[in-house]
Amino acid sequence: MDTPHTSCQLREYLGNRFVYAAISQRAGGLLLGIEMTPNQKCNYDCVYCYVKRDPANARRMFNVRVMLAELKELLQMHRLGRFKELSIFSKVPDELLRLKGVALSGEGEPTLCHCFAEVVSEIVNLRATAQWPDFKLMLITNGSGLNQQPVRQGLRQFRTSDEIWVKLDAGTDEAMRRINRTRVTADAVVNNMVAMGQWRPIFVQSFFCAFEGVEPREDEIDAYIRTLAEARERGASIAGVQIYSVVRPPANPACTRLPLNQLSSIARRVRAETGLCAEVY
Ligand code: SF4
């Protein structure tokens, strides 16, 4: 936000521990992000992740009460139009300072947060009070934890207009081991996407980059597109596919941006071969 999962040009904690403000290209404006994993825990280790994981952070715990106080403060700042007064946001056009949502995200995988359902519950309760402006709630996830009971319990509180953004960068275990450096399998993610997508629409986020100068192989792109098509055929409602590449220097300099024409070519193939709406960001 930029969370490691998504692309943002600006991100600022404003002295907070758990809530930050970010301008997100894909959300099209201001997001208030919840740092769900202050310990930076993730079950992926993507080659392109910008997070420099520090063992000293491993014991940092989420605190729901502090998060809520910080969220209220930023909502209030937004209501009073005070973001423009901050030097980091002073040059941002007004239309990009419109609040697009509150995102459950952060420097790790948000579904690993030990109090996921409680966080959702508290934010949904806050949203329900007339005191605060209405906002969309978003989950930005690598998809591996969507089958977990506490996560399901939290997501049941989402309303129809809230959004779930799921990462899918590859269609094979071999490519996932190389790009996402995880033991989570492609099948596990697709099964979760299908189960979630049969219940409510999801968005898919897919990152492509060159690694050590080597671009994704054609057979890998084929497998990725087949995986999207399979998820759709199995009944997953996929509202959109967001294709993107490096937008700011990742922690690993071996990872470089794919040219726009290649990203566009992948998006074209997704549209033609799966019928899904795909856009490059
Ligand atoms: S899934 Fe984990 S490792 Fe990959 S980009 Fe997101 S936070 Fe980083």
Image: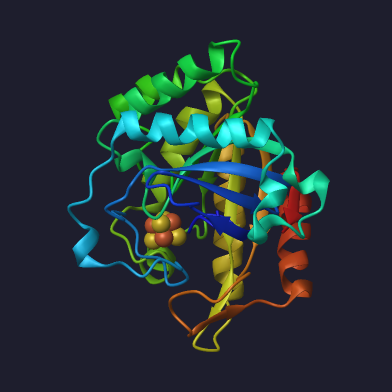
Along the viewing direction, whichever of 49 and 19 lies nearer the viewer: 19
Ligand 1 picture quarter: bottom left
Residue located at (46% from left, 68% from top): 50
Q: Which colour style is shown?
A: rainbow
- Please give the count of numbered marks on the rendered protein: 0
Along the viewing direction, whichever of 109 and 239 lies nearer the viewer: 109
Question: In screen coordinates, is 140 left or right of 260?
Answer: left
- Residue 36: quadrant of the picture: top left
Check the image and report above or below for 84 versus 169. above
Q: Is residue 86 visible?
A: yes
Residue located at (35% from left, 39% from top): 111
Check the image and report above or below for 247 versus 112. below
Along the viewing direction, whichever of 225 and 99 lies nearer the viewer: 99
Q: Is residue 172 visible?
A: no
Residue 224 in the image: state x and y as whole percent.
56, 58
Residue 236 in the image: state x and y as whole percent.
57, 32
Along the viewing direction, whichever of 28 and 86 lies nearer the viewer: 86
Residue located at (68% from left, 56% from top): 89
Question: In screen coordinates, is 60 left or right of 89?
Answer: left
Check the image and report above or below for 178 versus 73. below
Check the image and report above or below for 120 versus 253. above
Residue 15 in the image: state x and y as whole percent.
44, 52
- Residue 233: quadrant of the picture: top right
Residue 38 in the image: state x and y as whole percent.
31, 50
